[in-house]
């Protein structure tokens, strides 16, 4: 860290590289139990792994389902949840070449190894080794990089585990934003880690929404609203939002949603109401709730002959699709979308540039900001339908270097001074925007 004169006399990266770090994390000890925010040990990254200092993380509904232990087979405790985040590389393991200490990065739950048959195929964003796998609890070598201070292993979650000040991920699950030309604040990069990329990508990559087309979105959480942003950007003429929470419509109007249906209002099934206002059904419907009855409604809302339904919701129940095979003869089709069809490592930097240019507006998605200690409150607000996305910030996000303090203008993370980084160094200002103040 810089001393009062602004010169570098010691460096936290050098201090911690290759060593176990003691830091704070929100640990889940049982389904639906309050998080325990405690000191844990984060062990050094092994071969092809990256240790990240997490500066911001947020909560997605998938974290909520996993924390509740909705699917019994996924239950494993103690565990560190969280998969939407942004941060800075603290150190790398053997063989990692695409990121280095000090790089601004986003961890992704759906990785891209670049080598497997899926990664090499333009048609898919699956990855044989590092794709999303809710059953995976440990790193590739079968061990965990987290433990309690008394040495008990803590399980990983969705390739990421971001409710911690430090995490270790496979290099296939890290996107490097350091050298891309985007103008996004570090905080906003967090949204690209899951929700916004998933929703916008479903509209762009999976459905390929066309100009002047009609769209219905079931579930107006961050994922559904990101679908709306994506459809609005593509010039959809009508975007119908369906949600049981009427408060969601107020927010949704500013994000491209033109019509609102509350399934609890009126006698008619939702699909009939959608068909009435669209002359027979929408061109594209998106299911963003993880509810099978809603999925049925979404499917029936699509226009016969060409309507496409995209499933985004995570369905934790073992029940099967409520659709008879012969119904597909009416020309409606149905597909799923994971991470919006984006190949994370290779395509997100360009997506960030598009977001920075205003193609997709990110500011509406953040409704709250809290320190990580208040994670239980953040979960309560999501459950109550009062929030979209949070910034849960680590202490490190507010550390100031000497120059920042002196100028009383910039707040930079300590890790803006890794020894490997050549000037100008990247810092964040008080708003969390990236800047280059240290020449
Ligand atoms: P959220 O909790 O913020 O939003 C869900 C919305 O659905 C809420 O507004 C809620 O009121 C609404 N809703 C619930 N039941 C409903 C019903 N019966 N009819 C209409 N609306 C209803 O969740 P989110 O973070 O936006 O995530 C949405 C879904 O997407 C979750 O299932 C999540 O696990 C999943 N997800 C999938 C991917 C993927 O890659 N496919 C990525 C992220 C999230
Ligand atoms: Zn998510
Ligand atoms: Zn792969």
Image (cartoon, rainbow, N blue to C red):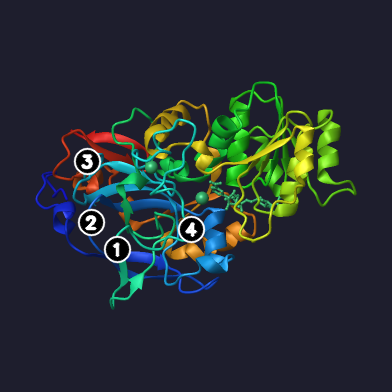
Which circle's residue, 4 or 2, is located before the other in the chain? 2
Mark 2 in CB contact with mark 1 (< 8 angstroms): yes
Where, by quadrant of the figure, is residue 351 drawn?
top left
Label 3 sits on a secondary structure element that is loop
The residue under label 1 is 145
Q: Residues within 10 Å of mark 3 (few under 14, many from 20)?
A: few
Residue 262 tag number: none
Figure quadrant of the C terminus = top left
Image-based side of 247 in relation to 21, left or right:
right
Q: Residue at x 50, y 54 (%)?
A: 59
Q: Secondary structure at mark 1?
A: loop
Residue 425: where, in percent of width, then height? Answer: 22, 37
* Residue for badge 3: 97
- Quadrant in which residue 373 is drawn: bottom left
Mark 2–mark 1 Cα distance, whole angstroms, equals: 9 Å
Q: Crowdedness of circle 1 by 10 Å Cα count: few (<14), some, many (20+)? A: many
The image shows residue 408, relative to residue 34, as above or below, that is above
Q: Which mark is residue 46?
A: 2
């Amino acid at each position: 860290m810089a001393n009062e004169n602004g010169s570098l006399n010691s460096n936290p990266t050098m201090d911690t590289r290759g060593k176990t770090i003691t830091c704070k994390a929100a640990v889940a000890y049982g389904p639906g139990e309050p998080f325990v925010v405690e000191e844990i040990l984060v062990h050094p990254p092994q071969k092809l792994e990256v240790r990240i200092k997490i500066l911001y993380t947020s909560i997605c509904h998938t974290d909520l389902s996993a924390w509740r232990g909705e699917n019994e087979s996924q239950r494993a405790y103690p565990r560190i949840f969280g998969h939407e985040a942004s941060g800075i590389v603290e150190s790398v393991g053997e063989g990692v070449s695409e990121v280095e200490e000090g790089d601004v990065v986003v961890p992704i739950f759906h990785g891209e190894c670049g080598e497997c048959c899926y990664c090499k195929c333009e048609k898919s964003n699956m990855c044989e080794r590092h794709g999303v796998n809710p059953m995976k609890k440990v790193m590739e070598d079968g061990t965990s990089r987290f433990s309690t201070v008394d040495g008990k292993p803590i399980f990983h979650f969705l390739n990421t585990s971001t409710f911690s000040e430090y995490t270790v991920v496979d290099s296939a699950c890290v996107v490097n934003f350091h050298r891309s030309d985007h103008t996004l604040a570090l905080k906003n990069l967090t949204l690209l880690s899951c929700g916004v990329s998933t929703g916008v990508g479903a509209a762009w990559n999976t459905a390929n929404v066309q100009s002047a087309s009609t769209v219905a979105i079931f579930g107006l959480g961050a994922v559904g609203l990101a679908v709306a942003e994506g459809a609005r950007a593509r010039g959809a003429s009508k975007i119908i939002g369906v949600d049981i929470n009427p408060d969601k419509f107020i927010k949704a109007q500013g994000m491209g949603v033109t019509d609102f249906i509350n399934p609890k209002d009126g006698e008619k099934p939702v699909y009939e109401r959608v068909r009435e206002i669209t002359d027979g059904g929408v061109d594209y419907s998106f299911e963003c709730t993880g509810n099978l009855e809603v999925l049925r409604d979404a499917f029936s809302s699509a226009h016969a002959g060409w309507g496409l339904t995209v499933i985004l919701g995570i369905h934790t129940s073992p029940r099967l699709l409520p659709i008879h095979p012969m119904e597909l003869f009416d020309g409606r089709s149905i597909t799923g979308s994971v991470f919006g069809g984006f190949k994370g490592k290779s395509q997100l930097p360009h997506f960030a540039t598009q977001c920075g240019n205003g193609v997709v507006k990110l500011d509406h998605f953040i409704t709250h900001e809290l320190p990580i200690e208040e994670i239980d409150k953040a979960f309560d607000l999501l459950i109550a339908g009062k929030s979209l996305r949070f910034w849960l910030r680590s202490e490190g996000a507010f550390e100031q270097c000497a120059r920042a303090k002196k100028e009383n203008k910039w707040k930079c993370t300590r890790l803006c001074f890794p020894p490997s980084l050549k000037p100008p160094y990247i810092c964040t200002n008080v708003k969390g925007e990236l800047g280059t103040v240290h020449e």
